[in-house]
Amino acid sequence: MKQQKNPLIKKHNLSFRKKTKIIKNLFYPAYKDRLYMTHLWVTTRCNIHCKFCYIRNYETKDPSLKELEKRLDKLKELGNRTTVIMGGEPTLRKDLPQIINACRKKDILSYLVTNGTLLNKKMIDKLGKNGLDIISISFDALDFKDSLLIRYGKYECDPKEKLDLLQYAQEKYDVMAFVAICITKLNLDEIIPLMKVAQKYNLAITLTVMANPFIIPNLKTQKTKKEKDPLLFKKIRDLKKLKKLIKKLKIMKKNGARIIEPYTYFNRILDFIENKEIEYMGCKAGKNFLDINTDGNIMLCVMSDPLPIHYSQLTKNNYRKKLKPYRKKQLQKCRKKCTLAAYLETSYYGDNLLEIIKTFLKIY
């Protein structure tokens, strides 16, 4: 019997030109086993407080626009053609449109990660006109006023306003837009409703499970009187609820939901729940992607500590050799623990390019 697809799930068609750019700048370098994605930290400042935040408790100055342009030049020299602009909250920078424009001028795919609270139509227009390629907005709570997961303070807004802006960006400026949902114990019951809202807005979805304290470096500061780790799934009843949700997500993906994660990621989470040997998905941190923090130091990923290596020390011929000993040491710690989709799916798709291209063309 043929499965009935959800009538609310519609495909947003990117232009042929944008699809070609994404394939050329992201998928082709992965095919060539090059550096295909970099997280460029433009600030550690943020205007809200998320309990699952990975930013360490340290303050650094924002790098200047001129300095960021130097970093983009270095990334291009290394062969990178996709840069994730992140923080902190990147939209706190008034020169964000200029950073996006610098990416465009250097033929680097610009990918903005934001909580969306400072976005408005005027800002979307500026970013779109300066060449923004991809935008992801955090969508972790249905009610900003009473969220147990995030303190919005004076930046409370209707979450649907953020989705309106994403829809506007993809339709007006041909931006690849999607929402990012973090699954924790505190918002577990909201995940399916969040998914349904995103579907109504014709938006793709990426999900990650905050299941292991290893991937939240400052989690030790997140305690309540009742529980040491209020975000995580430790009790049997919580793990059972998570398992039920993951199975639902797999079914939704099979029925056409625009979920970016591969089935392999969800299977990994199920193994975690069952306390089985977690399948290693071949993490490529420090090999095919890396981070440059606000100080200009290299990080293998957002969850690892900064290395004593400045980005200026890297060359196209030496960067893998320089990072190899740190990468080996780091993987010994995290290869069986990490549940972070942003890295696992990127690594998995790097080895399964045909699958990601099919997923990409199916969603967009």
Image (tube, grey):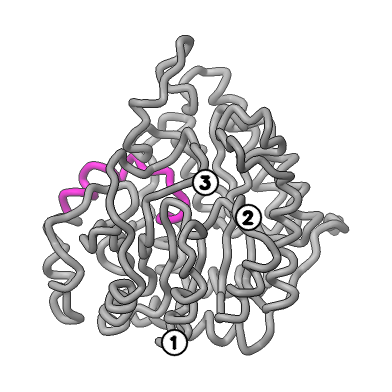
Q: Secondary structure at mark 3?
A: strand
- Residue 288 on image: x %, y %: 31, 69
Disc 2 or 1, which lies upstream in sequence? 1
Front in this rendered view, residue 185 or 351: 185
Place of residue 228 in the rendered image (x, y in percent of width and height, measured from the top left): 40, 17
Circle 1: residue type: Asp
Q: Quadrant of the C terminus?
A: bottom right
Which of the two discs, 2 and 3, sits closer to the camera?
Answer: 2
Q: CA distance from mark 2 to mark 1?
A: 25 Å
Q: Is residue 160 left or right of residue 97?
A: right
Q: Amino acid at mark 3?
A: Thr
- The chief SS type of the magenta part is helix
Is residue 34 at least partly visible in the picture? no
The numbered disc on residue 211 is: none
Residue 2 placement, left or right of 71: right
Span colored in magenta: 328-344
Does dot 2 land on a helix, a strand or a loop?
A: strand
Q: For this view, does 285 lie left or right of residue 121? A: left
Give me the disc on residue 179: 2
For discs 3 and 1, the disc positioned in front in the rendered view: 1
Specify the label residue 107 is tagged with. 1
Q: Secondary structure at mark 1?
A: loop
Q: CA distance from mark 3 to mark 1?
A: 29 Å
Residue matched to label 3: 208
Crowd class of label 2 (few under 14; some 14 to 19; many from 20; radius 10 Å): many
Task: Estimate the x, y position of residue 218 in percent, counting from the top left.
Answer: 33, 34
Whole-angstrom CA distance, mark 2 to mark 3, is: 11 Å
Amino acid found under the numbered disc labelled 2: Val
User: Compared to 313, does 86 lie above or below?
Assistant: above
Label 1 environment density (alpha carbons within 10 Å; few <14, some 14–19, many ≥20): some
